[in-house]
Image (cartoon, grey):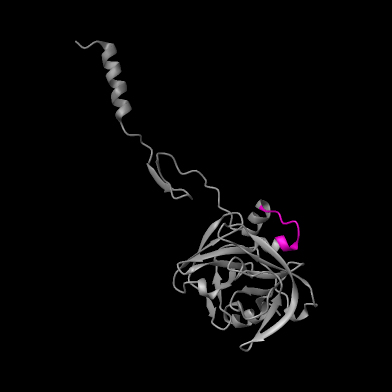
Amino acid sequence: MIPLRVLICVSFLVVGLMPAEGKVTTWTDDDGIVHIEDQPPPEQPKRSRDLQEQLTLNFPPQNAVEKARNATILVQSSKGVGSGFFITKDGFILTNKHIVNPSGTHKIVLIDGTQLEVQGVKEISEKYDIALLKLDGYKCPYIEPFDARRLPARANLYAIGMPMGLTHTVAPGIHSGTRSIDDVTYIQTSAPITYINSGGPLVTQFGRVVGVNTQKLVGQAGEGLSYAVPVFDVLAEFKKSLGEPFK
């Protein structure tokens, strides 16, 4: 005869090996980690889709130029790296044409290190060497345009860009007039424009963008002068995508 206490131990062991009656749930969290549990998945916090709020919290701007800096980004593709910036709150981006891959993926990096992907190109301007990208699904910080023809002589201007070290730079200068080259009128500025900030915005002291920085004219100009394509000329090139909301 088997002792009673042995029967009790065996009974507990069998019960412990029996599968639970609850349904096993498989779910994936926002970081791509797969969970297999016998409990329903917990409520997952939504990731912020408001980049403007996110960057204002992480990098509070102290002035209008720093606010424009928050809307400036690094753009990287298989063809190269350059600067760019948001021109609308729904995610349209201006950058250099020569660094984009028309059918490929572009990585953009924000000032706080956030990395996002942008697929393909909306429009390209061969004339100005500028491309229009679009980040979908986010509320973005953006820079309002200003007509360069309204700039007074020697107005303060700032070239903003993002070097390879992912640190935003603000290079000061003044408005030095305009120059027509190959039937294109460019803004002249003493703010230094290099590969670091080419494709980024040239802004006023009030944080309004007047031009898109370009290296296209390196060596053509006069010592100490850099060039930017007037932003309203660029917006006119891309009116198919942007419409005409900037008048």
User: Which residue is at the far front?
Assistant: 223
- Horizontal side of 26 relative to 162 (left or right) equals left
Instruction: Name the image quarter holding residue 52.
Output: bottom right
Q: Quadrant of the N terminus?
A: top left
Instruction: Name the image quarter holding residue 64.
Output: bottom right
* Image vertical order of residue 152 relative to residue 160, above or below: below
Magenta highlight on residue 63: yes
Residue 115 appears in the figure: yes
Q: Main secondary structure of the magenta part?
A: loop
User: Which residue is at the far left?
Assistant: 1
Residue closest to the eye, 220 or 31: 220
Residue 99: x, y in percent?
51, 71
Residue 147: x, y in percent?
73, 78
Residue closest to the eye, 144 or 200: 200
Residue 8: x, y in percent?
30, 16
Residue at x-position 78% and y-position 79%: 150
- Horizontal side of 161 relative to 103 (left or right) equals right
Residue 109: x, y in percent?
56, 60
Magenta highlight on residue 28: no
Q: Quadrant of the C terminus?
A: bottom right
Tell me which segment is drawn in magenta. 59-66
- Horizontal side of 19 relative to 172 (left or right) equals left
Residue 245 appears in the figure: no
